[in-house]
Amino acid sequence: METAKAWLSKLKSKDKVKSSKKKEATSNVKEGPKTAGGEEALSNITKEKAAAAKLYIENHYKMQMQSLQERKERRKMLEKKLAAAEVSEEEQNNLLKDLEMKETEYMRRQRHKMGADDFEPLTMIGKGAFGEVRICREKGTGNVYAMKKLKKSEMLRRGQVEHVKAERNLLAEVDSNCIVKLYCSFQDEEYLYLIMEYLPGGDMMTLLMRKDTLTEDEARFYIGETVLAIESIHKHNYIHRDIKPDNLLLDKDGHMKLSDFGLCKPLDCSNLQEKDFTVARNVSGALQSDGRPVATRRTQQEQLLNWQRNRRMLAYSTVGTPDYIAPEVLLKKGYGMECDWWSLGAIMYEMLVGFPPFYSDDPMTTCRKIVNWRNYLKFPDEVRLSPEAKDLICRLLCNVEQRLGTKGADEIKGHPWFRGTEWGKLYQMKAAFIPQVNDELDTQNFEKFEETDKQVPKSAKSGPWRKMLSSKDINFVGYTYKNVEIVNDDQIPGIAELKKKSNKPKRPSIKSLFEDETSGGTTTHQGSFLNLLPTQIEDPEKEGSKSSSSG
Amino acid sequence: MKAGRYEYRWADGTTMVSAPEYVELLMNWIETQIDNEHIFPKKTGEPFPPNFEDFVKRILRKLFRVYAHIYHSHFPKIVTLNEQAHLNTCFHRYLLFVSEFQLVDKEEMVPIQKLVETILKP
């Protein structure tokens, strides 16, 4: 190490001499202080590129070490099970070689660079300020996904970079029934792309528009699944901040999954200030003293219809609704995970009443109502709710300190309104409503979006991938992600055996090779490997061909 | 492109180019090699070519020249940018890899021989 330092210092001094020589040569050939100045001072572009290179290198080695560690763990786990299963040495070697082959295949697939050209864009199903969501089909496999496309420049302009990275990190990390699956993410010069699971059942917003209100049993099902989803992301230290019916997607069986972490529609309340709320309070007092003139009152039905009309307009716009956002988020005074439970309360209110609790014709008034929720949280007289339902809503739409869920999801799960709910079986039971889905490309459960700009998207692959590492892309280093479905290789008989034992739907990944087995408590380790033996014994020809192929 | 007293030319010595040009040409060429599915197959079960090792050796031999150029011509600048740890880590790993599998001849490493020997010394 010391000798290395000595060598580097020698190189340093040597380079100094060389650079001085070079300077003389330069001055001889060209006359101009510009060149000399350029050599001495490092330009901002150079500094930015160096910073980007550092980030790239650090991320590269971090990912590499992580992959290596995971591979070692998989092998160690397999060896452990083989030792416990009392399998013959020959069979052990075969299984280990099989794992090695799968690991090699996995690495090979990782080398493929995903790009927008690998997908055929189809119907648009969502739109926001930062981009759009569209069904797409992977050209190689024919699989159907939802492609979320986010404009980089908009991310940077609106300060959403950290939010987008957090979303990508969460989706890559969380493997849950309650969260939409992320298959891969990549970028080009203009856009970030997320290739996600397509859920053809539509979203909760569309369902509520169709149903007006839900019964308490129906609402309990969806609120329950939302509780599990929020609990899931909170366990990964992620705060959603913008949970609303549009972000609660339904799969083809009607089960709910949380989505749209990064396609926030920015609120149109940027000029909100504290004094606005003071004014609102005075107005509120005035209204109360007036005794609320009958002329200004609307029936529940009128409010519901008006809300639905406004909601439909909002869905097509690129401006978000503040109706479900917690007061502490609006006030921008710092917030924690409990802000998501407020949103849950607002959604529950809408499911049972027909419109959000602080609904108003314009967003600014809605924000004022939310911040002054004590004066505005009321239930229409026509509404018949159980005392438990009202109580739960009031415990969610309240101060942070008193809000249910601040100490964890169990506070909510334990509420009387959820009495009798089997939390572990919500995703196995029949959904409250089963959406009509005709085929995998069916979008009838989504709003129709006009293709306003029908210009053909130009090819994203312009020039080598390497060139995309420019200064502006410092923010998006580490964005690319792949989740290879290596377990779907049905040709390997061992894999088929493992897959059959898996009774619950699970994201295919190399991890699930071992997790499937551990999750099934009834299956013993010995039994699982003993089941493999008859297959080998019963197929002597196969065994023969295997040995010949290996030779 | 120079590395001390040594000069590298593009196209096996026929074309003299500046260092930025050389690096640009080299990186483009390497990307072409890696994207070539006949050399680096991506599909399941597709075999590597019999002379795969030759392709790898050629890539790594040329990559060494970039390291040599950076260490000889730009190391003080790298230090100013506080990037020497990153550079050394990459080169260290590169060197251990090519040494383990004997992918670059020792004659090729003469321009920064002392640094190489220091890293490889057991």
Image (cartoon, coloured by chain):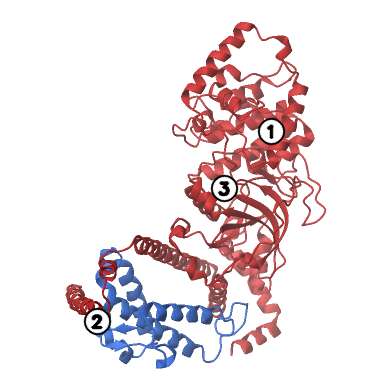
> Circles 3 and 1: CB distance less than 8 Å?
no
Task: Find chain B in the image and tell me its colour.
Answer: blue
Q: Which mark is residue A262?
A: 3
Spatial separation of the CA atoms under disc 2 and disc 1: 68 Å
Which amino acid does the dot numbered 3 rest on?
Answer: Gly
Q: Secondary structure at mark 2?
A: loop
Q: Report the label total.
A: 3
Q: Which mark is residue A220?
A: 1
Can you see residue A80?
no
**In the image, is A47 to the left or to the right of A348?**
left
Spot the red chain and give its letter.
A
The residue positioned 63% from the left and 49% from the top of the image is A177
Q: According to the image, label 2 marks what residue?
A: B121
Give the x, y percent position of residue A539.
70, 80
Q: Is residue A302 above or below residue B8?
A: above
Q: Nearer the viewer, residue B5 or A79?
A: B5
Residue A285 location, quadrant: top right
Can you see residue A93?
yes
Q: Which mark is residue A519?
A: none
> Circles 3 and 2: CB distance less than 8 Å?
no
Which amino acid does the dot numbered 1 rest on?
Answer: Arg
Quarter holding the N terminus of chain A is bottom left
Residue B109 location, quadrant: bottom left
Which amino acid does the dot numbered 2 rest on?
Answer: Lys
Give the x, y percent position of residue A150.
58, 53
The answer for which chain carries disc 2 is B
Q: Is residue B43 above or below residue A246?
A: below
Quarter holding the C terminus of chain A is bottom right
